[in-house]
Image (cartoon, rainbow, N blue to C red):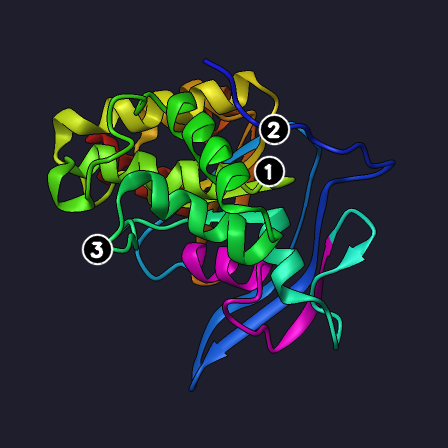
């Protein structure tokens, strides 16, 4: 299974987030968040609902505008005035929990549309690249299927293929399995594991603690808009330091 992907080298961290803050009205959703992500690193972001996890991802690719702070992708300032947002969103893929597919387009066309509109590929080149991306996520038999003919897990894999086909430098996942029936979760998580094996840098907001423990190089626990604790999965799950993280893990793991 081949993935149309090659990560460009950078001299420092691939992603740098500095003092990022964001409010929704009186609510401080992100409170002075700073984080660096190395190339090929996979980070799982965990925490209760409303802790700022999804907003963090959306600020990284400018779907939400931070109130203050800075985001750098390599040596490109994502948050700069006049930043080229189309180029940024090509380099930073984001897969949502609710698929966001065009229901009137076949799987192949859902993937190839961005290749034609964003990158400017010809119809034939976009078709070939879309089919390669769909094959890479195990959908080689579903090129001509409409979203309504696919399971939720298959639809999510089309969404992953659509982001991957643009050959991003960073992939972000916002609760990629939360809208799926339990039996479909493993297939989507398996695709993300394959992407790690191919060297993709990833931020994954997830409530799948077993996945975070197994796949992540680092786990970040967020609460009330702040990064409360971070570290290797074995320490985060085995020896949590903050009372809030211990409380959270007790509630989700039943211990």
Q: Quadrant of residue 217?
A: top right
Measuring 34% from the left and 26% from the top, which residue is drawn there?
A: 189
How far across and down, in percent of the image, does residue 172 sit? 49, 44
Position of 31 with respect to 152 (left or right) is: right
Magenta stretch encompasses residue 61: yes
Q: Quadrant of residue 149?
A: top left
Magenta stretch in the rendered image: 52-72
Measuring 71% from the left and 34% from the top, which residue is drawn there?
A: 38
Which residue position holds label 1? Answer: 167
Please report contact status of discs 3 and 2: CB closer than 8 Å, yes or no. no
Please report contact status of discs 3 and 1: CB closer than 8 Å, yes or no. no
Does residue 147 lie above or below 28 as drawn?
Answer: above
Q: Where's the N terminus, which quadrant?
A: top left
Which residue position holds label 2? Answer: 5
Q: Which mark is residue 104?
A: 3
Does residue 28 lie above or below 58 as drawn?
Answer: below
- Front-most of residues 97 and 137: 137
Q: Secondary structure at mark 3?
A: loop
From mark 3 to mark 1, how far is it between C-alphas?
Answer: 25 Å
Q: Which label's residue is closer to the chain start, 2 or 1?
A: 2
- Front-most of residues 16 and 181: 181
């Amino acid at each position: 299974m081949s993935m149309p992907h090659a990560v460009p080298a950078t001299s420092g961290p691939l992603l740098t987030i500095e003092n990022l803050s964001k409010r929704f009205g009186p609510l401080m959703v992100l409170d002075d968040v700073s984080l660096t992500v190395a190339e090929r690193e996979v980070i799982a972001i965990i925490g209760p609902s409303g802790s700022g996890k999804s907003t963090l991802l959306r600020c990284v690719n400018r779907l939400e505008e931070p109130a203050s702070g800075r985001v750098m992708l390599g040596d490109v300032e994502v948050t700069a005035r006049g930043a080229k947002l189309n180029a940024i969103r090509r380099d930073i893929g984001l897969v949502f929990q609710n698929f966001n597919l065009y229901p009137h387009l076949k799987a192949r066309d859902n993937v190839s549309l961005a290749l034609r509109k964003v990158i400017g590929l010809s119809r034939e080149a976009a078709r070939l690249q879309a089919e390669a991306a769909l094959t890479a996520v195990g959908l080689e038999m579903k090129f001509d299927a409409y979203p309504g003919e696919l399971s939720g897990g298959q639809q999510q894999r089309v969404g992953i293929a659509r982001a991957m086909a643009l050959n991003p430098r960073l992939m972000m996942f916002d609760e990629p399995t939360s809208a799926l029936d339990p039996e479909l979760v493993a297939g989507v998580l398996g695709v993300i594991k394959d992407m790690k094996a191919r060297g993709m840098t990833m931020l994954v907001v997830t409530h799948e603690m077993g996945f975070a423990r197994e796949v992540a190089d680092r786990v970040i626990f967020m609460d009330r808009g702040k990064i409360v604790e971070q570290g290797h999965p074995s320490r985060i799950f085995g020896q949590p330091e903050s009372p809030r993280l211990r409380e959270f893990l007790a509630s989700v793991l039943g211990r």
